[in-house]
Image (cartoon, rainbow, N blue to C red):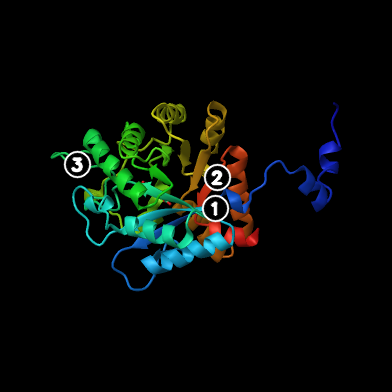
């Protein structure tokens, strides 16, 4: 076909034509809202670096979940902030721990009408802020952590989670969790693996929200992925599928669209993408300065994440985008 070919341009002429031929649609059904619930507070607390997102009380969390359900959001992922942290993160599997109580509250309030996902990790619960337990020399002990993850999975399933989502990037975590769930009679609870989780600078606001400080100015580079690597993400995904993951996740989302589209080619299981706290904060900060149109950029990013291959998106924009749509 000789250029200029006018066909593409003809089809862009009106909004109705563009709507007709749109390849990608973002809808309320694609969105999962991340929510924080904090133990021991009387009123919800704002999070400075995540404008519009709050640390919930048990009561305000249930109200929020009901409201999200009423506007059509299919599910939430819950993060807990315990009053007491310790070296092993024991509040993460305490049946009276904040996430377990919150899961029970939500389950009672909404029965099966909303998908409840529990983030499964110990960094919010440890006094050193790492996602695994530490050896004496301060390094993360992968294999001892697996046993703890198994206990947390059982506690979360017992409390009413539909899905547990291990985010700690320990090797073998999906197998350990699957086995632990199965031994305890939770064969029907699924595992959404944070398979390709990069050691990203974009988690900063989350750490404020979840009150996580990594000891001695440390980082997670020994267990989270190096963002220079793409093939490695596919190896992580394959390993998690092999270990029994029901769904896989790529995180963060927008800077990793190449990974999403490659993941789409190698698996038919549902793929989630997590548009993380820093991605949200950048949009909000620029929009509040009047530098970008926040709503337009939000829709553009979320649509791009879907276009690249995500089936659903965990996003702090869930509520407002559902309202726009
Ligand atoms: C770890 C966890 C993190 C996020 C989700 N789960 C933080 C981290 O790995 O440091 C970040 C999510 C976000 O930035 O929105 N439990």
Q: Residue 116 versus residue 275: which sits nearer the camera?
A: 116
Asked whether residue 216 appears in the rendered view, the answer is: yes
The image quadrant that residue 183 belongs to is top left
Label number found at residue 43: none
Q: How many marks?
A: 3
Between tags 2 and 1, which lies in front?
1
Residue beneath disc 1: 74
Q: Position of residue 201 (x, y in %)?
A: 40, 47
Q: Is residue 283 above or below residue 120?
A: below
In space, the residues marked 3 and 2 are separated at their CA atoms by: 34 Å
Residue beneath disc 2: 312
> Residue at 48% of width from left, 37% of height from top?
247
Asked whether residue 293 appears in the rendered view, the answer is: no
In space, the residues marked 3 and 1 are separated at their CA atoms by: 37 Å
The image quadrant that residue 228 belongs to is top left
Label number found at residue 134: 3
Taking 46 as reference, is 282 left or right? Answer: right
Evaluate if marks 2 and 1 touch, with contact meaning CB atoms under 8 Å apart: yes
Taking 286 as reference, is 165 left or right? Answer: left
Q: Quadrant of the C terminus?
A: bottom right
């Amino acid at each position: 076909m000789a250029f200029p070919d006018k066909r593409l341009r003809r089809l862009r002429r009106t909004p109705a034509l563009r709507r007709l031929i749109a390849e990608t649609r973002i809808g309320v059904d694609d969105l999962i809202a991340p929510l924080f619930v904090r133990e021991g507070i009387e009123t919800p607390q704002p999070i400075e670096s995540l404008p519009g997102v709050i640390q919930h009380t048990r009561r305000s969390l249930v109200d929020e979940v009901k409201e999200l359900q009423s506007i059509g959001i299919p599910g939430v992922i819950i993060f807990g902030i315990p009053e007491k942290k310790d070296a092993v993160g024991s509040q993460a599997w305490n049946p009276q721990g904040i996430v377990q109580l919150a899961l029970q509250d939500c389950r009672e309030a909404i029965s099966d009408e909303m998908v409840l996902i529990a983030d499964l990790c110990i960094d919010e619960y440890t006094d050193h802020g790492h996602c695994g337990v530490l050896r004496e020399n301060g390094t993360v002990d992968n294999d001892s952590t697996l046993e703890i993850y198994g206990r947390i999975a059982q506690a979360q399933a017992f409390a009413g989670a539909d899905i547990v989502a291990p985010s700690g990037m320990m090797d073998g975590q999906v197998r350990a969790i699957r086995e632990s769930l199965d031994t305890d009679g939770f064969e029907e609870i699924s595992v959404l693996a944070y398979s390709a989780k990069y050691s990203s600078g974009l988690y900063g606001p989350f750490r404020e929200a979840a009150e996580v400080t990594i000891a001695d100015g440390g980082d997670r580079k020994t267990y989270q992925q190096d963002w220079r690597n793409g093939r490695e993400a596919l190896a992580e995904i394959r390993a998690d599928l092999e270990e029994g993951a029901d769904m896989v996740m790529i995180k963060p989302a927008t800077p990793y669209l190449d990974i999403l589209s490659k993941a789409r080619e190698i698996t038919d299981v549902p793929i989630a993408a997590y548009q993380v706290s820093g991605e949200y904060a950048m949009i909000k900060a620029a929009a509040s300065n009047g530098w970008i149109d926040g709503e337009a950029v939000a829709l553009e990013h979320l649509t791009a994440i879907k276009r690249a291959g995500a089936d659903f998106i965990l996003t702090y924009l869930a509520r407002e985008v559902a309202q726009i749509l």
